[in-house]
Image: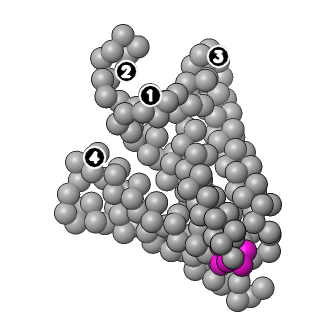
Amino acid sequence: MTASGQDAGEASPATGRGRTTPELQGAGIYGLIVTASVLATGGTSLPVLPLAVAVFVTLLVYWLAEEYAEVLEHAHSGHLPTWTRTRSLMAAKWPMVSASYIPLIILVVARVLGATTSNAALFALIGTVLLLMASAWRAGRSAKLTGVALAGMTVVAGLLGLGMVGLKVGITHLH
């Protein structure tokens, strides 16, 4: 333990540096799933900039709602967390929002390079699936999983993402 009460080498919630914790990994995976769902549903009808804003704002709302629920949980037990504790909790879940950065960059770059908005959203979704799989693999490795368990965890994350790709393709064909 360091003087701050944190294990040496553990990621700081505020900086995200060092080894990632399960909470950071879970928040990032959750953020990628939300990113994929907004890309899938909005990628057929919104222009790129409003779509990128919709992804980011949706994640901000989810992040704030989750943090508010945590504050309410503390209030229910008879005390509110300090502002320092609340800031720490908020920083720990920020990967829910920051997980969208790479898919949003893919979205914008694909559009700038000439892809239609729908195809740019599809490229961003494919990037999101790959990030989901990489995140799940990292989470499994940090949990010391190997073999079938590690592969299963990675494949399940990929299937969640592919479900969003299927949603996007289905909406495109119905639209």
Mark sitting earlier along the chain (1/3) = 1
Residue corresponding to mark 1: 12
Q: Are marks 1 and 2 in contact (CB under 8 Å)?
A: yes
Q: Is residue 116 magenta?
A: yes
Q: Amino acid at mark 4?
A: Ala
Where disc 1 sits, the SS reads loop
First in sequence: mark 1 vs mark 2: 2
Q: Does residue 75 sit above or below 92 in this rendering?
A: above
Q: Amino acid at mark 1?
A: Ser
Please state if 45 lies on the left or on the right of 64 as rendered: right
As shown in the figure, which amino acid type bears the numbered disc 2? Gln
The mark that comes first in sequence, 1 or 4, is 1
Q: Nearer the viewer, mark 1 or mark 3?
A: 1
Q: In the drawing, what numbered circle is on residue 6?
A: 2
Eye-nearest disc, 1 or 4: 1
Image colouring = one colour
Element under disc 4: loop
Q: Is residue 24 above or below residue 159?
A: above
Q: Which residue is mark 4?
A: 143
Q: Quadrant of the N terminus?
A: top left
Q: Residues within 10 Å of mark 4 (few under 14, many from 20)?
A: few
Q: Residue at x 71, y 84 (%)?
A: 172
Disc 3 to disc 2, C-alpha distance: 19 Å
The region drawn magenta spans: 115-121
Q: Main secondary structure of the magenta part?
A: helix
| Marks 1, 2: nearer the viewer | 1
SS class, disc 3: helix
**Residue designated by label 3:** 83
Spatial distance from mark 1 to mark 2, Cα to Cα?
Answer: 8 Å
